[in-house]
Amino acid sequence: MIKLFKMVHLFHYISPLVMMRSFPLIFPDILQGNFKPDYYLKHIQKDLRLAISMGDTANHPTPMAAAANEVYKRAKALDQSDNDMSAVYRAYI
């Protein structure tokens, strides 16, 4: 986990969480398994779904949103819907 944090911190320009400076704040919670929701994972996935739908309506592809949506759908399938959005990492551990 520490390696993951260092990697994300070094490449902060690709991580919206780090750019918002919230990743360093939530990282200890992730390590402790605390996923008390500040913003529910299910709401992030809903917003992604809406963005993809709007893109489809405008005939504008949204490949990054579609890829992120698949990750969040996997996390929801693993019963993470009512956890914080940071619980998305559980989809691939």
Image (cartoon, rainbow, N blue to C red):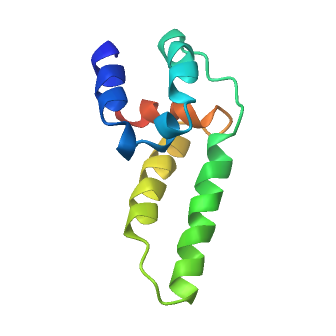
Residue 42 placement, left or right of 88: right
Q: Which residue is at the far top?
A: 32
State how many labels appear. Answer: 0
Could one spot residue 93 in this view of the protein?
A: no
Q: Quadrant of the N terminus?
A: top left
Residue 17 locus on image (x, y percent): 51, 37
In front of the other: 90 or 9: 9
* Image quarter hosting the C terminus: top left
Asked which quadrant contains residue 81, the reply is: top right
- Asked if residue 65 can be seen in this view, the reply is yes
**Position of 42 relative to 48 (above/below):** above
Q: Tell me the residue at 54%/89% (across/down).
A: 58
Up/down of 68 relative to 21, above or below: below
Residue at figure coordinates x 42%, y 36% from the top left: 91
Give the image location of residue 69, x and y in percent.
48, 57
**Residue 8 at x, y percent in the picture:** 34, 31
Locate residue 5 relative to residue 7 in the image: left or right.
right
Residue 4: % across, % down: 31, 23
Q: Is residue 53 left or right of residue 60?
A: right
Residue at horizontal 31 percent and vertical 36 percent from the top? 11
